[in-house]
Amino acid sequence: MDPFDVIVVGGGNAAISAAFAARHIVPRVLVLERAPEHMRGGNSRHTRNVRCAHASADQFFSAPYSEEELFEDLVSVTGGPANVDLAKFAIRQSSMLPRWMSQHGASWQQPLAGTLSLGRTNRFFLGGGKALLNAYYRTAESMGIGLRYDAFVEDLLIENDKFEGVALKTNGAREVIRARAVVIATGGYEANVEWLKRHWGAAADNFIIRGTPYNDGAMLANLLSKNAKAMGDPKGFHAVAVDARSPKFDGGIVTRLDAVPFGIVVNKFGRRFYDEGEAIWPKRYAIWGGLIAGQPDQIAYVVVDSKTIGCFLPPMFKPYQSDTFPGLAAALNLDPGAFTATLSEYNRATSGKIEQRLETPDGNGTQGISPPKSNWAIPIDRPPFYALPLRPGITFTYMGVAVDETGRVLTQSGAPFKNVYAAGEIMSGNILTKGYLAGFGMTIGAVFGELAGRMAATNARA
Amino acid sequence: MPELNLFEEANRQLVICNACRYCEGLCPVFRAIETRRDFEKGDVFYLANLCHDCRACYYACMFTPPHEFAINIPQVLSEARVESYRQWSWPGFLGRAFKQQGIALSLAGGVILLVVVLGLALIGPPRLFVMHTGPGAFYAVVPYLAMVIPAVALFFYGLAVWFRGTVRGWSETDGKPDRKISGKALAEAIGAALGLRYLKGGGPGCTYPQQRPSSSRRIYHSFVFWGFLSDFVSTTLAFIYQDLLHELPPYPVASAPVVFGALGGVMLIVGTAGLIGLKIQSDRAPANTRAYGMDYTFLITLGLTALSGILLLIFRSTSAMGSLLVLHLAMIAALFATAPYGKFVHAIYRSMALVRYYVEHEHSAKG
C-alpha cells in the first residue's frame, strides 16, 4: 500500500483539526482513534467552549476581548506560560477560530443562564463538545479523511529522527501503516493510574479521572522513549473537587461540586484545613482538587445548611442530610465529637451575618480561627444540615513533549524530529505549567492542531 | 415501564441533566430544567410535552448508554409523554389505546367497518354504484343530515375530551398557580408551535431520522399541519357556500373549497408519507419504539383520509363516486373517533406546554 501523506494519532479536537488542515493540502490523510466510535473524541467530548480573542461583540460574544487581555488572564492563572512565543501565537490565532471552526461544521449557542459568566471570553458549542465532535467527524468523512476506530498505535516507527510509520493494533490484528508525516494528538496520561502512582503513590487510587479512560499516555511514553524532550512537571495535574461517589472514569462535568464557598470543608478527622472563602470563582474552583489530594485518604466533606443548599448548582448525587451535627457526622462516618467541635468553633468565629453576596468577595470573614474563612463566613446553624463528600477530580496532566514554532516535536538535543508533530494536551505543557484558564485547552488544541496538520502536510508534500 | 419507575427514572436522568446543562442551547426543555431542582410527576409531564423529540440532546450527550449514567432523555420523555396522554384522556378504558395499539386499531377499524356496512345497508347498491352528477350529487348518495350529525357529534366529542385533558394537564403541570397567561406569552407559544421552532435542534436542524441534522422532518411536519389546516378551511368554505350562498356541492374544480381541499389533501399525503418514511429510517437508540405504533396509526389514518378525499375528487363524476364517498366519510369518522386517543393529541398538549414555557420564561425574566 502507498504510504499515507499524514497520519493523525488521536481523535479529539486537536487531532481532527490537524486532519482538516492536512487534508486541505494533501489527499491521503488517516485518523487513528484509539477509542471505539461511541467514545471517540478524547476529553474534547467533555468540553463546552473555546476561549478566543475578538475585537468586537457578535451574536455569540457579549463584548470584545483583546489579545492583550487574554494574555494577561493566562499569566494571572498560570503564573506565565513556559514558552511565551507559542502562547502568543495561540492567542493571536484564537481570533480566527470561530470562523475556521464554523467552516468545519461547528454550531454555537448564545450565552444563557449557565454560560453567562464566560459569555464575553468564551464561545460555546451548541450542545457541547460531543456535538462539536459529531459535526467534525461528519465533515472529516465528507472531506475524504480516513477514519479508524479502536485503532491503538503500539509503536511509532522512527529512524534517525525520521518517522516512517506506525505499528497499529486494531481489535487484536496487527499491521504497519506508513506515512510521510505524523501528528500526535493523543492527550495526556491522567487516566493512567499506574503512571500517576509513580509520582503520587497509593493516593492515586483515590483520584477520580473526570475524562476518557483512553488517555493513558501511551504515545507520550513512546515519544519520550524515542528521545523526545519533555515539557512540564511530571507530577502536575489540573484537578477540581468532585463528588467522591463519582465513577472512577468519565464522570465529566456532572460530578463537579461548586459548594465550597457556601460552607466549610473538613477532612476525614472532621477538621478544617484551608480557607474556603479565599478567592473568587475560577481560581477557587481550580485549587480544591489539589488541596484534597494533599489530605489523608484524599477525602474531604463540604458542609452547608438549609440557607445555602440552594445557592450552588444542584449536585448530581444527593447530599447527606441530618438535623444535628452528630447525626451528619454519623452519616459521613466521621468522629461526631471532632466534627461538632469544628462546626461550633466555626460558627462562633463568624459575625453571624447571613447576607449572601456571592458575586464578589464580601469581606465577611471569621475571627480567631485557623485556618480562617476570609469571605462569605455565613454561620452553619439552620437545619437540616447537608454534606457532600469530595475527592480530587483530575482533568488533565501538564507534562508533555516540547515543540518548535511549527509544531514539530523536539528531541532532547533541542533539534526537531524531521516529520513528527504534536498538538493539543500532549504539548500543552509548552504553554500551561500550572493552573487553568477555562476553554483554553480547546484553543490550544484547535490552534496547534491546525498548525501541526498544515505543517505536516506541507512537509509530506515536499 | 411501570408508572412509578418511570417517574423515578425520569427524575434520576433530569437531575443529572441539571448538573450538566450543556444542552441548554438546544431547546426549552433544558432551560425549563434549570429552573427546577426536583422533578415530580407534573414537572416530568410538562417537560415531556415540551420535548419535540428532535433528539439533538441524545447525540450531544456524553452519558448515553453504555455509559453507566445511561442518559436517554428523548426516550424517557417519550414514555412519560405517552403516559400523560393516557392519564389526561377520558374515559380510562379508551385512554388505554395510547399504550395498546390493538385498542386504537380496533377503534379505527370498527368505525370504518361500521360506516361502510351502514352505507351498504342503508343506501343500497342501486343508489351507491350508479353515477350522480350536478348540485347535491353527494347528498343523493348520503343524505346531508346523515353526514353532518355524526361528524359534528364526533368533532365536539373530541373537543370535549381534549378540553378536559388540557384543563387537567394545565393544573397538573402547574407549579405556581398565580401565573397569568399574558398575550405576549401566548403569541410566542403560537409562533413556536406554528413555525415548529423547536424542531430545529437548536439551529442546524432536527437530528432525525439519524444523527445528521436535517430539515426534512420539519418540512414534512409543516406539510401535514398546513395541509390539515387547508382542509379545515375548505370544509368551512363549503359550509359557507352551502348554507349562506345556497350552492350545493360538488363545487367546480376552480372553486375555493375544491382548491383548498385538493391542496390540503396533497400536502397531507406528501407530509404523512414523508414522516412515515423518516420514522422507518429513524435511529431506534433514542426512541421509545413502543410509541411507534401510535404514531404510525395516526399518520396512516390521516394519510388515507386525505388519499380517499383526493380519489373522490378525481372520480366524482363516475359511478365510483358513491363508494368513494362512503369510504372517505368512513376515514374521516375513524380519524375523528381516534383523535382523542391517538397521536393527534400531541398538537394540543405540546401547545399547552409551550404556553406554560413562555409564561414561566416571562416570569423568570422579570423576577
Image (cartoon, helix red, strand yellow):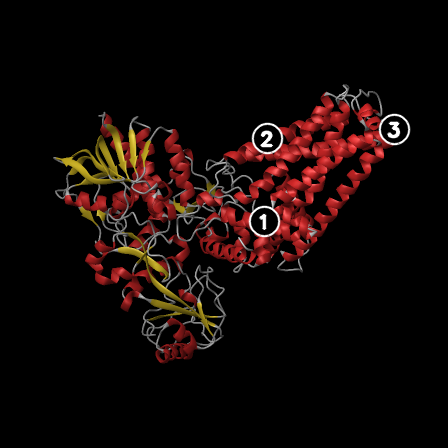
B129 shown above or below B339? above
Label 2 belongs to which residue?
B273
Question: Pointer 2: residues within 10 angstroms few (<14), some, or many (20+)?
Answer: some
Mark 1 near mark 2, Cβ–Cβ under 8 Å? no
Name which of mark 1 and mark 2 comes first in the sequence: 1
Q: Residue at x 79, y 42 (%)?
A: B153
- Of the two numbered discs 3 and 2 in the rendering, the one whose residue sits closer to the viewer: 2
Residue B303 visible within the image: yes
Q: Which mark is residue B246?
A: 3
Q: CA distance from mark 1 to mark 3?
A: 45 Å
- Of the two numbered discs 1 and 3 in the rendering, the one whose residue sits closer to the viewer: 1
Q: CA distance from mark 1 to mark 2?
A: 24 Å
Identify which amino acid the numbered label 2 is placed on: Ala
Q: Which mark is residue B81?
A: 1
Please name whichever residue, B27 or A346, is drawn nearer the observer in this view of the structure. Answer: B27
Residue A374 position in % (x across, y down): 38, 70
Residue A192 position in % (x across, y down): 25, 52
Quarter of the N terminus of chain A within the rendering? top left
The subunit letter for the residue under badge 3 reads B
